[in-house]
Image (cartoon, helix red, strand yellow):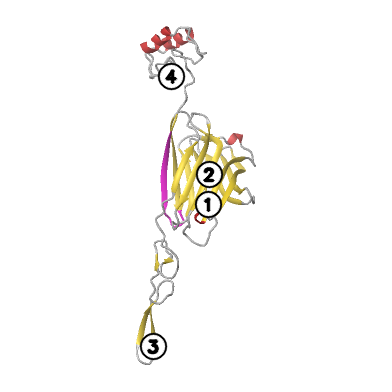
Amino acid sequence: MLIGFVNPSHLIAQNFDCNGDVNGSAVIDNCGNCVGGNTGAVACIAFTPSVSVVLSNTDCDSLSDLTITVSQDANEPDMGAALFASNTGSFDIASMSVGDVIGTADLSANNGANTFITQLIVDSIVSSDEVVVQSLDINTGLPLGTFTILNTNPGVSISASPGVADGNNTTSGNSQTLTFSNVFVNPSSGPLVFTTTIDSELGDQDVQTFSFTITCSNTCLQQGDADCDGVVNLSDLTLVINNWLQFTTVGTNGDVIGSEDGFVNLDDLSLVINNWLQSTP
């Protein structure tokens, strides 16, 4: 801004920057903060959190660890609310009780200068589909965050509330790794997609997707076995005959082991005949 000072001889115009320095070079950045010049502050950068979602296994209908990692570079806008959701799968809420440890979280702030290790504790069970989880520091017992996990039928959601206000709207660099241990139930075979939606305190939004292929391991080893009992006999032949020339789920209803093409035909009948009374040890 320009301010005039009057002296006996002439008028002098002086420029002040946003930091109040005469003829300074500080400016307002895209986050609304005064940076550069004599402020010691650096302009904020784009809101681009790094996110990963990992499952410990992709076996159908089995319990799995679910690990979510989120990190930010220094000078990004602070994160606000976050939502992690899947299109299928569920949490094993029925087996949870208040006080149960259902996972861990590793937290880092101030570009790694401050680190915390926490346990994820069941704080309250709101309903058969909703649980509130607290992240408690293992050294102090103090809560460092709260999450709500929900079975959305189908799928799940994990919502994280905004943290305590820190008096600014940018980060000096942070990361969080949350692992929900052996409480996520993989769906039946097919695609599983997680969508992460993270908002910044300034209204930015980051959306990412992570896809998994859930498969069912074939525990039937004997070729020609149609009912997975380990031996090829009349029951297998009956299944083939009763489902003759029918389309079916791969490996079921007469689509015998060794064929598994989703159609009951001569291939299946031949495998039954050629392996008649053979069995898997």
Q: Nearer the viewer, residue 125 or 205?
A: 205
Q: Position of residue 140 (x, y in %)?
A: 64, 51
Q: Residues within 10 Å of mark 3 (few under 14, many from 20)?
A: few
Q: Position of residue 227 (x, y in %)?
A: 48, 15
Q: Is residue 203 magenta?
A: yes
Q: What's the CA distance linking mark 3 and mark 4?
A: 94 Å
Q: Residues within 10 Å of mark 2 (few under 14, many from 20)?
A: many
The residue pinned by badge 1 equals 108
- Amino acid at circle 2: Leu
- Amino acid at circle 4: Gly
255 to 154, vertically: above or below: above
Return the mark for residue 6.
3
Ranked by sequence position, the earlier of labels 2 and 1 is 1
Q: Nearer the viewer, mark 2 or mark 1?
A: 1
Ranked by sequence position, the earlier of labels 2 and 4 is 2
- Amino acid at circle 1: Ser
Q: Nearer the viewer, mark 3 or mark 1?
A: 1
Q: Residues within 10 Å of mark 4 (few under 14, many from 20)?
A: many
